Image (cartoon, rainbow, N blue to C red):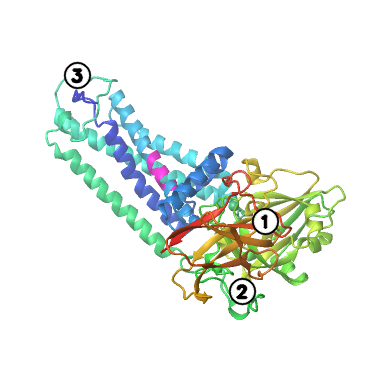
Amino acid sequence: MSTRMGNPRAGPGALTGALVGVLLTAPLVGIFYLGWKVGGLPFVPFDVFESVTRRLPGPVVTRGIEALVAAIRRLELGSTDVAAKYAEQLMAIAGVLLAGAVAGLVFFAVRRGRGAPGGRGGVLLGAAAGVLATLIIWDLDGASGTTAFAHMLWILALWMSWGAALDWAHRRLEAGRETATAGSGSKLPGPEVPAPDESGQAQGWVEPLDRRRFLIRLGSAAAAITVSGAVVGMLADPRRGRLASSGRRWSEDNPLPNTGAALQPAPGTRPEFTPLDDHYRIDINLLPPVIKEEDWALEVRGLVDRPTRLTLADLRDNFRPMHQFVTLACISNEIGGDLISTTRWTGVSVRRLLPHLRLRPEATHLKITSADGFFEIVSLDTINGDERVMLTYAWDGVPLPTRHGFPLRIYIPDRYGMKQPKWITSIEAIDNWEAGYWVIRGWDREARMEATAVIDTVALDSTARTVDGRTLVPVGGIAHAGARGISKVEVRVDDGEWREAQVRTPLSGTTWVLWRYDWPFVEGPHRFTVRCYDGSGRPQVTQPSPPHPDGATGLHSMRAGR
Ligand SMILES: Nc1nc2c(c(=O)[nH]1)N[C@H]1C(S)=C(S)[C@@H](COP(=O)(O)O)O[C@H]1N2
Ligand SMILES: [Mo]
């Protein structure tokens, strides 16, 4: 790109166009943000991102998530779920900025090729972008009628203003050049555009700094608008700082059911009961759907005698609440990963609810659909065979937090989270099995939880006990096998023998167990490895395999010593 022909007729180059594109798109994002926070209008970057990722082929999404999770773990960016959400949000905004840059680049290049100044091409381009954005997010927005129309107008108006600004910026830059080259000869169409010169000098500006000054001014204005939009939007956010699920938590007032358990966890073992705010969160949304109880009812339809709607009060008041301690894990959790948590779930056993739904005899499955478009299919056999399958409305004694599925989610024992929709809006009785959201995208249709054991701590610094003159260092962690329980945990140090660890009485048969092994201390660096057996005595799969397609397997180990 060294051929600087400096064609004086060529006008501002494509790279300038890319820069202008970014400078105009940033404030656009800022204003969309403001409109979203203040007026509940669509935030185009997130909506487009979600819409696009949901339409991508399964393997692409899977590989993308794997790469993201791996990168977060390698870079030690903190908890995987939180870092992943931020990364996705960043990608969504970066994507729009990139699109703005490309649009500016193409626009300036085309303008330059044509050599014709002026025009309203930018407004048209903006209108096209607005229409495209509206179409992409159409089914996601969930708005209808006048609201949908207002949303569309907002998106169109903003994008068209963006386009008008693009026209204006181009005209302004073009005018600078015109003054500079006035009377310098014939108009050349110049389709072979030379590499644009960012200094502006080679393009015959009388005052080489003029273009730069314009771009700096544009940049400052862009920054001012973007930052104001972001700051005002953040301050105005009515949801800011408000906990969706307030109220006194069950765990604040009640002892855990295994309080009397003989075995004390090794110091440094994770909490057996995950604080509600620390429960991992995974779903397909950049922002969780916000549902108001008064706007919501569970729709029951399909192969039923009469379609009905159940309110949250119906579910809460007409059925005996059922409480279960549950360890939930994401199928994307790697061995030793943090996408696993435990809390107390409260709801209605689906088996007990079933007679009230008046299903037709042909019905064999329930299709459960969520506010975010997520869905899964549960067989009636599963429901009738296990009263623990539960429509859940509370966690730790308070209504489900927004990000965990308010107002209603389902619990299906022994399955990974991908089988268990949050934010349920409807239950449809059907007469055949169907693939659910992640099954369509290439994940296992059963998604049964694998047995896994993890070392949380080798508590070298704790006050160790001494037995027969030997120091014992507590080693501890969790073991989990869905709803199958854990019968045995064993620990190996370096290449030594497998030694049986002690297992603490769990919170319930559907939670992880804490284990502890008091290791006779030997100086030097060591490698600790753990393995477990499920409730029926079946050893965990020790062969390492990645999360996709049916959950990670393999042994967890940790290096420690002094
Ligand atoms: N509606 C809806 N439900 C969903 C999901 C989703 O994306 N949308 N993700 C599932 C997955 S993959 C997991 S691991 C669990 C996580 O639940 P949590 O975020 O409350 O821990 O929710 C499940 N239910
Ligand atoms: Mo998941």
Q: Amino acid at mark 1?
A: Thr
Q: Earlier in the sequence, mark 2 or mark 3?
A: 3
Lateral position of residue 380 relative to residue 32, left or right: right
| Residue 522 rendering spot, x and y as whole percentages | 47, 65
Task: Specify the segment rendered in magenta.
Answer: 92-99
Q: According to the image, label 1 marks what residue?
A: 425
Q: Is residue 423 visible?
A: no
Q: Main secondary structure of the magenta part?
A: helix
Q: From the image, which quarter does the N terminus lie in?
A: top left
**Disc nearest the viewer among 3 and 1:** 1
Q: Earlier in the sequence, mark 3 or mark 1?
A: 3
Residue at 37% in and 57% down? 230
Q: Is mark 1 within 8 Å of ligand 1?
A: no
Judge whether residue 95 is colored magenta. yes
Q: Which mark is residue 186?
A: 3
Cα–Cα span, label 3 and label 1: 67 Å
- Badge 1 marks a residue whose secondary structure is strand
Q: Amino acid at mark 3?
A: Ser
| Residue 425 rendering spot, x and y as whole percentages | 67, 56
Could you say which is closer to the camera, residue 117 or residue 466? 466
Cα–Cα span, label 2 and label 3: 91 Å
Q: Mark 2 and 3 residues: CB-CB less than 8 Å, in contact?
A: no
Lateral position of residue 548 relative to residue 125, left or right: right
- Badge 3 marks a residue whose secondary structure is loop
Q: Mark 1 and 2 residues: CB-CB less than 8 Å, in contact?
A: no
Location of residue 345 by image quarter = bottom right
Lateral position of residue 413 relative to residue 523, left or right: right
